[in-house]
């Protein structure tokens, strides 16, 4: 991932949230980023995080992507610890959410922890991936950092 691009995206989200809070304050509204502010039988709100690298976009390949994502499984708990408060309330395994406790991935799978988009498949298994686990209140810098650390390790195993 290009560091300047990911840092810019994180900065933009933090600044956007700041403006949202200030505008809401002016009009006497309250902004709530909690992933499940109202308990009940619904999915809650997430901060799905699309990610790619030059390798996933230019080289990719089915075997590489599958091996790469298998490398994310051992780090699932570490990711969940970084992906926002109350994520376990949102990620029930129902309502198009993955399980908080178990890691999964799949093609166009809206119930997977990480979804492999149809775009990536249609482009010869080259493209981006979607981590569907982060909560709406997650810190984008922590999410990005955790994805990058796991990617770096999983990539080395996938190309070996």
Image (spheres, rainbow, N blue to C red):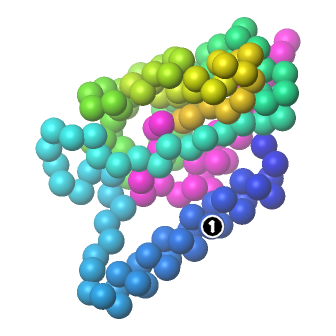
69 or 125: which is nearer to us? 125
Percent position of residue 47, x then y: 47, 49
Residue at 52% across, 17% down:
106
- Whether 145 is drawn above or below 55: the answer is below
Residue 149 visible here: no
37 or 50: which is nearer to us? 50
Residue at 74% across, 16% down:
124
Residue at mark 1: 12
Q: Of all residues shown, which one is farthest toward the front?
A: 122
SS at circle 1: helix
- Whether 20 is drawn above or below 49: the answer is below
Quadrant position of residue 15 = bottom right
Main SS, magenta residues:
helix
Percent position of residue 13, x then y: 57, 64
Q: Is residue 52 magenta?
A: no
Q: Is residue 36 left or right of residue 41?
A: right
Percent position of residue 132, x then y: 48, 36
Q: Is residue 153 magenta?
A: yes
Where the C terminus falls, by quadrant? Answer: top right
Q: Is residue 7 left or right of residue 82?
A: right
- Whether 160 is drawn above or below 85: the answer is above
Residue at 33% across, 30% down:
96
Region of the chain picked out in magenta, as a range: 132-160
Q: How many marks?
A: 1
Q: Of all residues shown, which one is farthest toward the top?
A: 63
Q: Is residue 58 left or right of residue 92?
A: right
- Whether 68 is drawn above or below 48: the answer is above
Where the N terminus falls, by quadrant? Answer: top right
Residue 20 visible here: yes
């Amino acid at each position: 991932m290009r560091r300047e691009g990911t840092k810019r995206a994180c900065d933009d989200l933090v600044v956007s949230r700041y403006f949202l809070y200030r505008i809401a304050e002016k009009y006497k509204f309250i902004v709530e980023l909690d992933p499940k502010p109202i308990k009940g039988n619904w999915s809650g709100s997430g901060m799905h995080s699309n990610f790619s690298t030059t390798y996933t976009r230019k080289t990719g390949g089915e075997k590489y992507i599958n091996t790469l994502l298998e490398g994310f499984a051992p780090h699932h708990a570490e990711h969940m610890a970084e992906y926002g408060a109350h994520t376990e309330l949102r990620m029930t395994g129902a309502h198009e959410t993955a399980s908080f406790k178990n890691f999964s991935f799949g093609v166009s799978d809206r119930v997977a922890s990480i979804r492999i988009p149809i775009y990536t498949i249609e482009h010869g298994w080259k493209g981006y991936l979607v981590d569907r686990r982060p909560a709406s209140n997650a810190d984008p810098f922590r999410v990005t950092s955790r994805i990058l650390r796991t990617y770096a390790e999983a990539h080395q195993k996938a190309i070996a």
